[in-house]
């Protein structure tokens, strides 16, 4: 009998933990000139996520800091079942990481009530000291990733060896594609479903975190048979 691998979950934030993409929602609200084309270029993979997100925030002056931060936080809705899923992970000795292409000024406040250790949350940073908002990239790509991810999910996934861990990605969109290709299983929504279908990756669709808990429990039951 082979030793059972420990499960580790890498969970996206925008459009996954929250119902919507908070960055897109912000720019839909403030509508600085040129924002929509940049979003299209990111989603269609014409522009790297790092370049596109950097350009987007650069459209906003740092003087808007307060309203940008407030807007991002107050428009977000946490997807049902998230709290229960965190409890499920804890009870079942599953490691849980937030791997987010979002920005620190909304990711940390929105997760504040969930008791996730700070070193289990990865996201981008922000700098309001210049004339325009500048996004910083404390977790940029390391070799061999050449996607120019911004927050590089594959670099984090690679720190958990496939020999020791059963690696699982939860996500919805373009920032999840590269990591999805590396892992054992994917819980997907929206655009990530199409990508999984196209690349024949092992996945299950989900709408809430309750769906994921149920799927995990069913897998456990199968494993015991
Ligand atoms: Mg997302
Ligand atoms: Zn990368």
Image: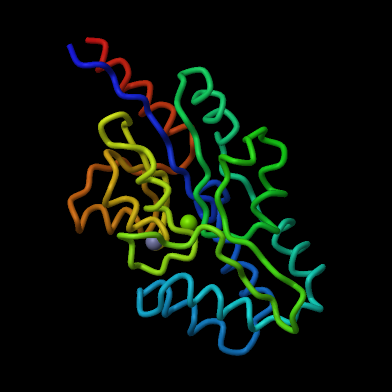
Query: Which residue lies at the image location 40% right of the left edge and 69% below the top edge?
Result: 148
Question: Percent from the top left, x then y, of residue 100?
Answer: 52, 53
Left or right side of 110 for 205:
left
Q: Nearer the viewer, residue 201 or 28?
A: 201
Which residue reaches farthest front?
Answer: 143
Question: Percent from the top left, x then y, of residue 16?
Answer: 50, 49
- Which image quadrant is residue 71 in? bottom right
Quarter of the image that includes the N terminus: top left
Is residue 101 positioned above or below 117 on the image?
Answer: below
Query: Which residue lies at the image location 59% right of the left edge and 41% below the top edge?
Result: 119
Query: Which residue lies at the image location 70% right of the left edge and 70% below the top edge?
Result: 127
Which residue reaches farthest bottom?
Answer: 33
- Which image quadrant is residue 149 in? bottom left
Left or right side of 21 for 193:
left
Is residue 78 positioned above or below 94 on the image?
Answer: below
Query: Which residue lies at the image location 36% right of the left edge and 79% below the top edge?
Result: 46
Is residue 223 positioned above or below 144 on the image?
Answer: above
């Amino acid at each position: 009998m082979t030793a059972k691998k420990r499960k580790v979950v890498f969970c996206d934030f925008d459009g996954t933990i929250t119902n919507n993409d908070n960055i897109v929602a912000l720019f839909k609200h403030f509508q600085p000139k040129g924002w929509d084309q940049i979003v299209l270029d990111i989603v269609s993979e014409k522009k790297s996520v790092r370049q596109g997100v950097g350009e987007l925030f650069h459209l906003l002056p740092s003087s808007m800091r307060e309203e940008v931060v407030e807007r991002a936080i107050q428009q977000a809705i946490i997807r049902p079942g998230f709290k229960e899923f965190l409890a499920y992970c804890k009870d079942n000795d599953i490691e849980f990481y937030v791997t987010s292409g979002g920005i620190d000024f909304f990711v940390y406040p929105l997760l504040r009530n969930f008791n996730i250790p700070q070193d289990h949350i990865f996201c981008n940073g922000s700098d309001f000291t210049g004339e325009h908002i500048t996004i910083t990239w404390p977790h940029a790509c390391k070799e061999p990733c050449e996607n120019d991810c911004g927050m590089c999910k594959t670099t984090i996934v690679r720190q958990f060896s496939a020999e020791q861990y059963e690696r699982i990605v939860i996500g919805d969109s373009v920032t999840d594609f590269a990591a999805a290709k590396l892992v054992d299983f994917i819980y997907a929504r929206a655009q990530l479903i199409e990508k999984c279908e196209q690349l024949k990756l092992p996945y299950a669709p989900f709408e809430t975190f309750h769906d994921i808990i149920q799927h995990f429990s069913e897998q456990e039951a199968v494993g015991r048979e």
